[in-house]
Amino acid sequence: MKISARNIFEGTITQLQPGAVNAEVGVSIGGGSQITAIVTIASARSLGLAVGKAVIVIVKASSVLVLVDAAGYRLSARNSLAGTVTEVSEGPVGAAVTIGLPGGNFVHATITHESVAALGLKPGVPATAIIKASSVILGAAS
């Protein structure tokens, strides 16, 4: 499979909480990092989601927010992945920021040049990738 999304993680379902319409799915992606996804009950059934099942987690880089100096802040977004900026690539339209996570995974975000400057992003700066659970796509082998 080829896909344009920059963030693709292999993981294992650690939690599955079905609701009336949606299910909350917790996925361990290694290195102590966990991602929560919200999927419809119909999607959970068609994918055969269950605790222990291997899944692919997909997040578009444009759906990732970057936060620095997170101390004391609480957010409604379910996924907060703390790490260190490893790369900032300035392009003509925006910038690509890569955040290295403990355990070796990387999260990629596309943000504006203004945000790179305002946040002081450069390699070595601690940063947190913020991802809404509703922006997470899950894939599973049949």
Image (cartoon, helix red, strand yellow):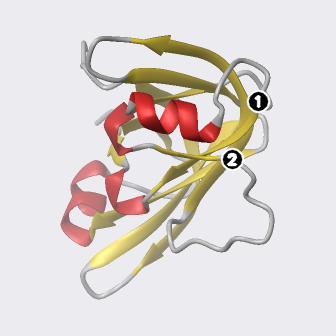
Within 10 angstroms of label 2, few (less than 14), some, or many (20 or more) residues? some
Q: Which residue is the extreme one toward the bottom?
A: 20
Residue bearing mark 2: 68
Q: Nearer the viewer, residue 60 or 13?
A: 60
Q: Residue at x 44, y 43 (%)?
A: 64
The C terminus - image quarter: top left
Q: In the figure, is residue 107 to the left or right of 99?
A: left
Q: CA distance from mark 1 to mark 2?
A: 8 Å
Tell me if I can see residue 60 in this picture.
Answer: no
Residue 60 location, quadrant: top left
Secondary element under disc 2, as helix, strand or loop, is loop
Which amino acid does the dot numbered 2 rest on?
Val
Q: Are marks 1 and 2 in contact (CB under 8 Å)?
A: yes
Q: Residue at x 54, y 65 (%)?
A: 78
Q: Residue at x 66, y 74 (%)?
A: 74
Residue 101 location, quadrant: top right
Q: Position of residue 73 (x, y in %)?
A: 70, 71
Which amino acid does the dot numbered 1 rest on?
Val
Q: Nearer the viewer, residue 124 or 37?
A: 124
Q: In the figure, is residue 85 to the left or right of 40?
A: right
Circle number at residue 125: 1
Tell me if I can see residue 6 in this picture.
Answer: yes
**Residue 47 sits above or below residue 127 on the image:** below
The N terminus - image quarter: top left
